[in-house]
Amino acid sequence: MDNTEQARVPAKLLLNPAHLLSLGFGSGLSPKMPGTMGTVVAIPLFILLPELDWKIYLGIVISAFLIGIFLCGYTAKALKVHDHPAIVWDEIVGYFITMFMVPKAWMWIVLGFILFRVFDIWKPWPISIADKRLKGGFGIMLDDLIAGVFALIIIQITLYLLYG
């Protein structure tokens, strides 16, 4: 989808709370790299989260994923395009998955960002299958969930190798 199609997102959608969230508080309206901009929005949200027990953090991420199925599907229907680039709630949740049980230090925050974006853009198997074959809000969310898990695995292996 080119920038002309992407520019067709009416700014008035941001007045609807569901669209505001699915469009990453407006970050998805960026004319360049909206998915990356959506992931950038996730960083301060992650930093501002208090230190949580892993079960609570996981509960928040699962809830955000389930809510995202509705949000992303709702906005996709409004835009009449499956997985419009401006829909970035999935990137926000994908980054939160990447950062599960990862220290809040800049090295890990940046590494998580880079790894998540690489997997989300590259879309190796099975991410590409989820991206191409599944439609609706679930399809929009699932490829980013898998990208987040791939990035998380690499970070956890790195943490283990460095710190045991």
Image (cartoon, rainbow, N blue to C red):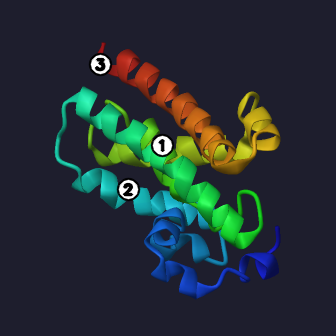
Find the distance from the CA under tag 2 to the CA under tag 1: 17 Å
Q: Residue at x 81, y 42 (%)?
A: 132
The residue wearing badge 2 is 43
Q: Secondary structure at mark 3?
A: helix
Q: Residue at x 82, y 67 (%)?
A: 1
Mark 3 vs mark 2: give the one in front. 2
Residues at discs 2 and 1 in contact (Cβ within 8 Å): no
Position of residue 28 in the picture relative to residue 109 (left or right): right
Find the distance from the CA under tag 1 to the CA under tag 3: 30 Å
Instruction: Residue 98: name its quadrant.
Output: top left
Answer few, some or many: residues within 10 Å of disc 3's Cα (few below 14, many 20 plus, some between 14 and 19): few
* Among numbered discs 2 and 1, the one appearing first in the sequence: 2
Position of residue 23 in the picture relative to residue 106 (left or right): right
Looking at the rendered structure, the kind of residue marked 1 is Phe
| Disc ID at residue 65 | 1
Answer few, some or many: residues within 10 Å of disc 2's Cα (few below 14, many 20 plus, some between 14 and 19): some
The image position of residue 48, as x and y in percent, is 23, 56
Q: Secondary structure at mark 1?
A: helix
Q: Nearer the viewer, residue 106 or 29?
A: 29
Asked if residue 89 shows in the view, the reply is yes
| Disc ID at residue 163 | 3
Q: Quadrant of the C terminus?
A: top left
Q: Secondary structure at mark 2?
A: helix
Answer few, some or many: residues within 10 Å of disc 1's Cα (few below 14, many 20 plus, some between 14 and 19): many
Relative to 96, residue 26 above or below = below
Q: How many numbered discs, if any?
A: 3
Mark 1 vs mark 3: give the one in front. 1
Asked if residue 85 shows in the view, the reply is no
The image position of residue 32, as x and y in percent, is 66, 73
Relative to 159, residue 119 above or below = below
